Amino acid sequence: MDLSRSGRVVTAIVVLAVASFVAVGTASPAHADSVRDDAWYLEDLRITEAHRITKGKGVVVAVVDSGVDPTHPDIVGNVLPGVDIFTGEPPARGRDGYTAYHGTAMAGLIAGHGHGPGRRSGVLGIAPEAKILPVKVTRPEGLSTGREVASGIEWALSLGADVISVSLQTPTETLIDRAVKKAWNMGVPVLGATGNDGPSGMQFVRGVIPVTAIGSDGGFVEGLQPMWKPIGVAAPGGDIPTAREGGYWTNTGTSNSAAIAAGVMALIKARYPDDEIAHTYRRIRVTADDRGVGGDDSEYGYGVVNPVAALTEPVPYVSIGASTEPPEPTPSAAARDTSKVPTVVIVGGVGWLAVLLLGAAVGGVVLRARRR
């Protein structure tokens, strides 16, 4: 597949049933009293040990997604007002396009604190003392565009995000490239899902850490997307119990793995707030547990995230000097213009009513946007 700059274009129209919650393979309801027991990734990542060092306090993680339900018992109190990019106001129930199922799931994996006695029930996130900044970029019909995702990243930066998580199927869009470059220059890491059975444009953007998924057996989840270039990391993504409006669901997808890796990044930012971004990226990569053929590879990247190692192991420091672009107080006018661009598909955890792919070529290449 030719993924040169001249051919990196995706044009798609996707209709999403945001009221349903289906991912790759089978998805099934989960109950609050079983969610914690089924959260196999907590033991595999030694989260209890990591939480003795930090729980992410003081870090703001932007979830650029479909909105977040701030009343869910597992994240209540951890959700900031955020913004709906179409109104410039916080996302609100009853407003067109308020579809928080997928975003709520991602928020729980990042910063869920559970509920009940000792908070032993429900979803425990990787960084339960971090704050979630919901940035809603989906339209009423579940659609979003490359320009809107770029706008969401810029809004996240303007509202003080320390980490940005993008569990979306994005096109390869110049505006996204520019928004991520701005995040880099502001020292804000951006993590993106690689995709399920179709690649997301996020993994082709310089400055993004692409994240692919492993299952409970520790192996790469077959059928999901590997990395085009092995520059990212892997994280748990198979059979993950997640929060959703009104309850819980178990699903598989690189959405989950990207959110979990974003939680690990929140722990790193809390522990090492003064690190330059190049060193922050280096820390999550070089402390990852190598899997596969040895060294970086397309199925695991640098390896599976290891929160404890990332927080405790010495990592040779690499300086990039001062940022070259100062932060702006509000998103640019270009980012506010949300028209005439390719469409983005939410990754995993969302049901599809129909998918209609419309081809458009630049340099004669079309990347098909498929279910991820």
Image (spheres, rainbow, N blue to C red):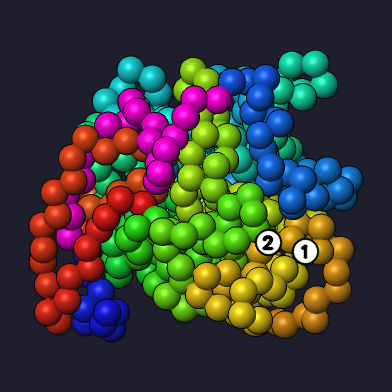
Image x and y of residue 119, in percent: 77, 23
Q: Is residue 151 visible?
A: no
> In the picture, residue 141 is in which quadrant?
top left
Tell me the SS state at disc 2.
Answer: loop
Q: Is residue 344 magenta?
A: no
Contact between marks 2 and 1 (CB within 8 A): the answer is yes
Residue 180 at what x, y percent from top left?
45, 65
Q: Which residue is mark 2?
A: 305
Which of 365/282 is in front? 365
The residue at 20%/57% (across/down) is 342
Q: Residue at (11%, 63%) from the top-left corner?
A: 359
Name the residue beneath numbered marker 1.
310
Q: Secondary structure at mark 1?
A: helix
Q: Bin the neighbour count of mark 2 within 10 Å (Cα to Cα): few under 14, some 14-19, many 20 and up.
A: many
* Residue 19 among magenta residues: yes
Tell me, yes or no, if residue 214 can be seen here: yes
Residue type at tag 1: Ala
For discs 2 and 1, the disc positioned in front in the rendered view: 2
- Comparing 75 with 35, the one in front is 35
Q: Quadrant of residue 303?
A: bottom right
What kind of residue is marked 2? Val
Magenta extent: 11-30
Q: Is the stretch drawn in magenta largely helix, strand or loop?
A: loop
Left or right: residue 136 compared with residue 314 = left
